[in-house]
C-alpha cells in the first residue's frame, strides 16, 4: 500500500503567483528603472520571499524579459483581434495608428525599458522579444500588402518603407511625451497623423475620394 509520504509530488504551476510576481516586477521596474530596481524590492511588492523570485527568474534581466514579453503578447493579441473585426485596409491601419499612439501615452515606461535595456543588448536578435517585434510589425505590413492588392494602397509604395514611415513617425511624435494628454487629445493626434500617412500611401482611386470624407471614423 502506498502511503501519502511515498507518493510522488506533482509539480504545481501557480499561474496566479506568476502573475503577481510579474505585476510587482513591472511596477518596480517602471517606478525605479532597471538599474535601481532590486529583486528584494520586487519580492516585497509581491509579498513573497526573495528566493521565490529567483525560483521564477534566474536574473533580474530575465525577469524584465518576462515582464515585457507578457505585455507585448497581450498587445499583439489585442491588435490581431481588432484588425480581424475591420474590413477595409484603411480602417485596419487607422485603428493601428490610434492604438500605437495609445502605447506611447499609456505604456511609455515599459516602452522605455524595452528600448533602453533590451533592444540595445547584443543578443537581442536571439530573444523572444525580437521575434515578437517582427510578429507585431508583420501585422502592419500584411495589411499594407493586402491594401496594395485591392488598390486601396498605391502599388508604388514598398511595404517596408510604409512600415518605417508609420512606426518611425509615431515613435518620433511619442518622444515628445503624451502622458499628460487626455484620450481625446491623443485620438486627435492619432487621427491627424493617420490622415497624413494615408494621403501619402493611398491608391489613386481611394485618394480621389478623400476630399469628400470628413470627421473621424465611427469605429476606431
Image (spheres, helix red, strand yellow):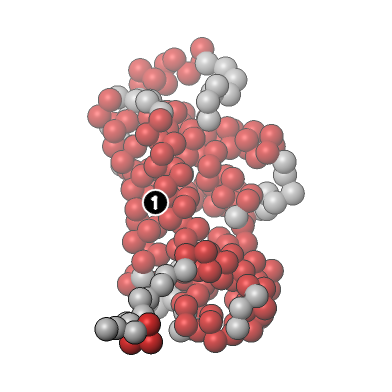
Q: Between 61 and 195, which is closer to the camera in this rendering?
A: 61
Name which residue lies at 60% across and 20% down.
215
**In this image, 194 relative to 205: left or right?**
right
Where residue 11 sits, quadrant-wise, is bottom left
Report which quarter residue 108 is drawn in.
bottom right
Q: Nearer the viewer, residue 83 or 145?
A: 83
Q: Where is the N terminus found, in terms of image quarters? A: bottom left
Q: Position of residue 86 (x, y in %)?
A: 41, 28
Q: Residue at x 58, y 32 (%)?
A: 191
Task: Classify 59 as above or below 78.
Answer: below
In this rendering, would 43 be left or right of 131? right
Q: Is residue 5 above or below residue 116?
A: below
- The image position of residue 57, as x and y in percent, is 47, 79
Q: Residue pushed farthest right?
A: 180
Where residue 47 sits in the image (x, y, percent)? 65, 75
User: Can you identify the residue that label 1 sits on?
Assistant: 136
* Image: 23 above or below 107: below
Amino acid at each position: 500500500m502506498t502511503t501519502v509520504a511515498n507518493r510522488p509530488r506533482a509539480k504545481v504551476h501557480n499561474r496566479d503567483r506568476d502573475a503577481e510576481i510579474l505585476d510587482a516586477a513591472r511596477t518596480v521596474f517602471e517606478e525605479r528603472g532597471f538599474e535601481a530596481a532590486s529583486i528584494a524590492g520586487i519580492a516585497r511588492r509581491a509579498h513573497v520571499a526573495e528566493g521565490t523570485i529567483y525560483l521564477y527568474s534566474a536574473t533580474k534581466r530575465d525577469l524584465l524579459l518576462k515582464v515585457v514579453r507578457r505585455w507585448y503578447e497581450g498587445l499583439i493579441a489585442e491588435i490581431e483581434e481588432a484588425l480581424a473585426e475591420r474590413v477595409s485596409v484603411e480602417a485596419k491601419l487607422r485603428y493601428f495608428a490610434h492604438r500605437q499612439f495609445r502605447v506611447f501615452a499609456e505604456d511609455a515606461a515599459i516602452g522605455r525599458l524595452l528600448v533602453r535595456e533590451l533592444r540595445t543588448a547584443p543578443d537581442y536578435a536571439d530573444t523572444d522579444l525580437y521575434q515578437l517585434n517582427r510578429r507585431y510589425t508583420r501585422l502592419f505590413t500584411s495589411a499594407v500588402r493586402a491594401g496594395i492588392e485591392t488598390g486601396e494602397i498605391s502599388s508604388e509604395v514598398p511595404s517596408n518603407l510604409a512600415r518605417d514611415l508609420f512606426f518611425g513617425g509615431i515613435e518620433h511624435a511619442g518622444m515628445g511625451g503624451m502622458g499628460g494628454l487626455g484620450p481625446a487629445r491623443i485620438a486627435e493626434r492619432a487621427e491627424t497623423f493617420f490622415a497624413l500617412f494615408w494621403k501619402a500611401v493611398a491608391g489613386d482611386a481611394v485618394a480621389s475620394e478623400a476630399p469628400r470624407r470628413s470627421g473621424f471614423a465611427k469605429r476606431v
